[in-house]
Amino acid sequence: MPDVLSAPLVVEFPFTRSLGPVQSAFLTGLRERTVLGVRTDDGTVLVPPVEYDPVTANELGDLVEVAPTGTVTTWAWNPSPRRDQPLCTPFAWVLVRLDGAGTALLHVLDAPGPDAVRTGMRVRIRWSATRTGAITDIACFEPYEGEPGPTEPAPHTGEFADPVTGIVAPARLDYVHTPGRAQSAYIKALEERRTVGERCPACRKVYVPPRGACPTCGVATAEQVEVGPRGTVTTFCIVNIKAKNLDIEVPYVYAHIALDGADLALHGRIAGIPYDQVRMGLRVEPVWTEGARHVDHYRPTGEPDADYDTYKELV
């Protein structure tokens, strides 16, 4: 039985977004050690605030300031913090209803152990020493035995000097990928500079990369078919934004390429031709680099362009 392939895989990208007036005021307030909520049509104070009433969908803008103290409404203990979590020591995830708020805020509680955490316990915000206008300006919550804050929140204009108008939220997923039989055969063939797909026994289409089943007929596939190496550009896009940790100068072209003998186009970068000369129907061939386990890019073969009718079903 062949060895099962597996490898760690990381999917990561920074998500950049602009902020509306309510979210801008909330995050700027955190930078200034001020917690703002917003009052809904029925008088409920939402913390964190949202810009539209979740019941009526009306636009919201009645900002109020709530206390930095509150009550734990529910919690879960985290004995093994992961990378980039708020605390590097074991902590509790908590929902805290701040004094004056009608909803709970999700954050972490610094506690010596699960026996020290309970629903209903009183806590307060521990502010970060350096604050930039992000939810991490709240370093964590900590147990608090002092007087509760006011139950009636105070009106606030939401105006601050140098307001935060945008944020970058990093997204990352770490996992171990096991490709399975069909994709393992595809990957091993790439090591030999070959491209292998699988043919559906019902519709007879060849799919590359193979998935072990026909996406159209839903039946298992097992017959291996070598395709390419040459192919046809069916459609493409010009990339103008440089990706982090990717050593490719922009602009460059990323295309769908229908390899000869395949009934599904795969992705590939086009090089060896000015980006503004890439076109549908361009005939291309793979370029491998020394020691690589996959195609580096595709370049023009010099053949005449393919007729549109030969690849129109793969666009």
Image (cartoon, rainbow, N blue to C red):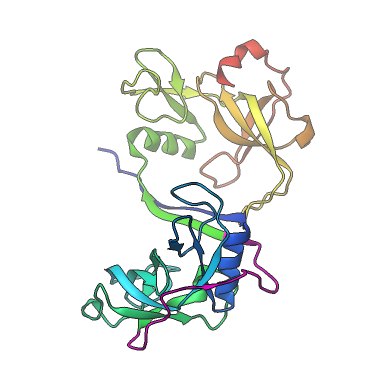
Residue at far bottom of view? 146
Tell me if I can see residue 80 in this picture.
no
State left or right for residue 8 relative to residue 14: left
| Image coordinates for residue 250, horizontal then vertical, percent | 73, 47
Of 158 and 127, which appears nearest the observer?
Answer: 158
| Image coordinates for residue 255, horizontal then vertical, percent | 63, 32
- Tell me the residue at 36%/89% (across/down): 146
Within the magenta stretch, is there residue 296? no
Of 183 and 215, which appears nearest the observer?
Answer: 215
Image quadrant of residue 62?
bottom right
Within the magenta stretch, is there residue 157? yes
| Image coordinates for residue 117, horizontal then vertical, percent | 26, 77
Residue at far left of view? 115
Q: How many marks?
A: 0
Which stretch did the figure color magenta?
144-168
| Image coordinates for residue 71, horizontal then vertical, percent | 33, 74
Q: Is residue 137 above or below residue 53?
A: below
Image quarter of the C terminus: top right
Of 206 and 217, which appears nearest the observer?
Answer: 217
- Tell me the residue at 45%/68% (across/down): 84
- Tell me the residue at 44%/26% (across/down): 197
- Tell me the residue at 36%/17% (across/down): 217
Of 170 and 62, which appears nearest the observer?
Answer: 62
Image quarter of the N terminus: top left
State left or right for residue 9 relative to residue 59: left
